[in-house]
Image (cartoon, rainbow, N blue to C red):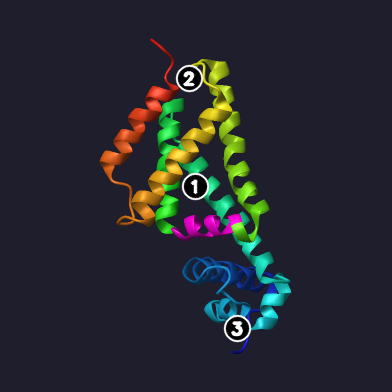
Amino acid sequence: MTDVVITGAGGRALSRKRLLDAAEDVFAELGYHDASIVKLTEAARVGQGTFYLYFSSKKEIFDELVRDLNRRVRHAMKEASSKGTTRLEAELLGFGGYFSFTAEHPALYRIIRQAEFVSPEMLHYHYDKLAEGYVEGLRESVAKGEVGDIDPEVTAWALMAAGELLGMRYILWGDGRVPKKVEAELARIIRRVLEPPA
């Protein structure tokens, strides 16, 4: 295997991205323990020397992959939710963004499950980062009276759990998408949780 020669700063960023994309596929397919730096570099079509320009170990690229997936899923959710005109709309659109991202990147589920054993600190990082903005957004919505008198932290974690398990059920173990009837039922549940009492 020879290095794919890509010169300049753009080439360096491309090589690093190729390694992360390959890591997403390899760790999801083989699992952390059966993955190797050789398999990662073969999948990325780069030499091992290129790997060591960016990462010192298999665990380092795994940790960076968790951070990368986390950044991208949060971006997808924020971008989708920002189109909502009410908190409830934003909430539902954010879930839609999450489901769209995980439909394109189902490896996220497998990689996060592996993190529990491979890199517990990254498991905490992933969920803490997801919850951080969510809790703050719900706290602001409570203060504005857009939602009922909820506990923002408990509500955020409970709704995150619902979204993740529904995604696993229908995206990872199903046909790769969340059916409309499931989205409608989730919307009904979220509405019941968030709407202020009449």
Residues drawn in magenta: 105-116
Residue at the spot 68% in from the left edge and 52% down from the top edge: 121
Q: Residues within 10 Å of mark 1 (few under 14, many from 20)?
A: many
Residue 115 is covered by the magenta coloring: yes
Residue 164: where, in percent of width, then height? 45, 45
Furthest residue toward left: 181
Q: Which residue is mark 1?
A: 76
Location of residue 86 by image quarter: top left
**Marks 3/1: CA–CA distance:** 31 Å
Q: Are marks 3 and 1 in contact (CB under 8 Å)?
A: no
Q: Nearer the viewer, residue 152 or 120?
A: 120
Furthest residue toward bottom: 1
Q: Which residue is mark 2?
A: 147
Residue at the spot 44% in from the left edge and 35% down from the top edge: 83
- With respect to residue 106, does 154 lie above or below? above
Location of residue 180 by image quarter: top left
Q: Are marks 2 and 3 in contact (CB under 8 Å)?
A: no
Residue 75: where, in percent of width, then height? 54, 47
Q: Mark 3 or 1 closer to N-term?
A: 3
Residue type at mark 2: give it: Val
Residue type at mark 3: give it: Val
**Marks 2/3: CA–CA distance:** 53 Å
**Residue 4, numbered circle:** 3
Q: Pick the quarter of the image with the C terminus.
A: top left
- In the image: residue 175, left or right of residue 76: left
Residue 196: where, in percent of width, then height? 44, 15
Q: Nearer the viewer, residue 97 or 35?
A: 35
- In the image: residue 159, left or right of residue 117: left
**Marks 1/2: CA–CA distance:** 23 Å
- With respect to residue 119, does 54 lie above or below? below
Q: Secondary structure at mark 2?
A: loop
Q: Pick the quarter of the image with the N terminus.
A: bottom right
